[in-house]
Image (cartoon, rainbow, N blue to C red):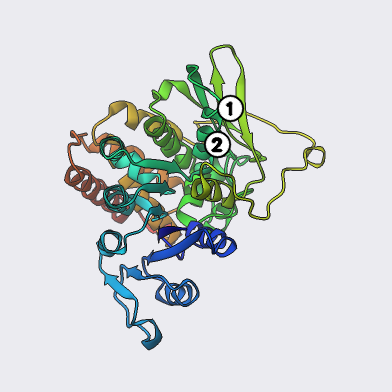
Amino acid sequence: MRSIAILGATGSIGTQTLDIVRRYPERFYACALAAKADAEGLFKLAREFKPRCCALVNESKIPEDLKRIEWFFGEDAAPRMLRACGADDALCAVVGIAGLDAVLTALDCCKRVLLANKEALVTGGSLVMEKARHLNRELLPVDSEHSAIFQCLKAAQGNPVEKLILTCSGGALRQWDEARIQNATVSQVLQHPTWRMGSKITVDCASLMNKGLEVIEASYLFDMPQDKIDVVIHPQSVIHSMVAFEDGAVLAQMGKPDMRGPIAYAMGHPERLPYGQTPPDFAALGALTFEAPDTKRFPCLSYAREAFRAGGSAPVILNGANEAAVEAFLKGEIRFGRIAQIVRRALNECKPQAIRCPQDVHEADILARAQAQKMIRALPPEV
Ligand code: MG
């Protein structure tokens, strides 16, 4: 029996993780659950899974029947919960840079960290990887592309890797022309063609920022320079990613697009846990297609690569401006095309600094958000 703390328990990844816990009650105990604001959702999960500890960022009145649980509130509720709960594993599915402190604390307290939050690596990758190495912790990717690469690398058997190939669905706007992309609405952008995910990441998929963040994530996780990480659009989302070797051979990991795949793989690792999914029906699929990403229509992919090349806090600036812009877009304050413009300007206007500690990350993040907010306020009303 492994005890697991789930951060972001009420979100898309969190609830799918609890699906796996529900299937394997003899193997997993969800000993700690953390959510940001969905108190009612968390209470419901707490009644079903009976954790020892729970955390909520927004303080809330605790129902009588849940008072035997140890509760934590506030911005740092999840890290404090992690220190108290004694979990073997932590699954970190917090949205955005808020995941960084959670991941660093999880590395301190837990044997294995199942990583669904990519912003922690984008903004504090060297800090996270250094801590994982220093404490000899297992960091298991839950992002589908990175889980795929992780699985393919098991077959490398010490042979050098030529490159990593990240696949990308292309998002909801893949076939749209530039002018239409600029004015895409929230509901259009949230129509992901293949994956069911939370709203922030689904917006990032439509702008291809998600793939840019994933290049950075892959570089840290697999210690691979970014010029050895390719991106290819693959609209069917059957190949989750690939690894190419020096002899030209390529290994791919395939499956239906179902986030429970990478979640169950990380939870059961090194064992594969069935979760009710079947292999793809290749004859019914007919064809798997590929195309190059168009960075003219979707410049965020190039901005992410550029920020990563610049180094220091540049990826933090990219990420902070993007988080602020995506939030404004989801609230209807700006049109979709503004997201890329805001990120571009933040990169131009904030000078990258060295990152030595988490505080450096937070300072760069605050600066980037302030810069983005200033731009958002200066824009004429448009939606
Ligand atoms: Mg992904």
**Position in image of residue 318 (x %, y %):** 33, 40
Give 334 or 130, whichever is nearer the viewer: 130
Crowdedness near tag 2: few (<14), some (14–19) or many (≥20) residues, C-alpha within 10 Å: many
**Position in image of residue 382 (x %, y %):** 43, 57
Residue that extends furthest to the right in the rendered view of this protein: 283
Dot 2 falls on a residue whose secondary structure is helix
Q: Amino acid at mark 2?
A: Ala
Give 349 or 273, whichever is nearer the viewer: 273
**Position in image of residue 51 (x %, y %):** 41, 70
Quadrant of the rendered image containing residue 79: bottom left
Q: Is residue 198 depicted above or below 253 in this figure?
A: below
Q: Using the rendered image of the protein, determine whether residue 300 is visible from the camera's viewpoint.
A: no
Dot 1 falls on a residue whose secondary structure is loop
Which residue carries the number 1 mark? Answer: 292
Q: Amino acid at mark 1?
A: Ala
Q: Residue at x 42, y 53 (%)?
A: 91
Which residue carries the number 2 mark? Answer: 148
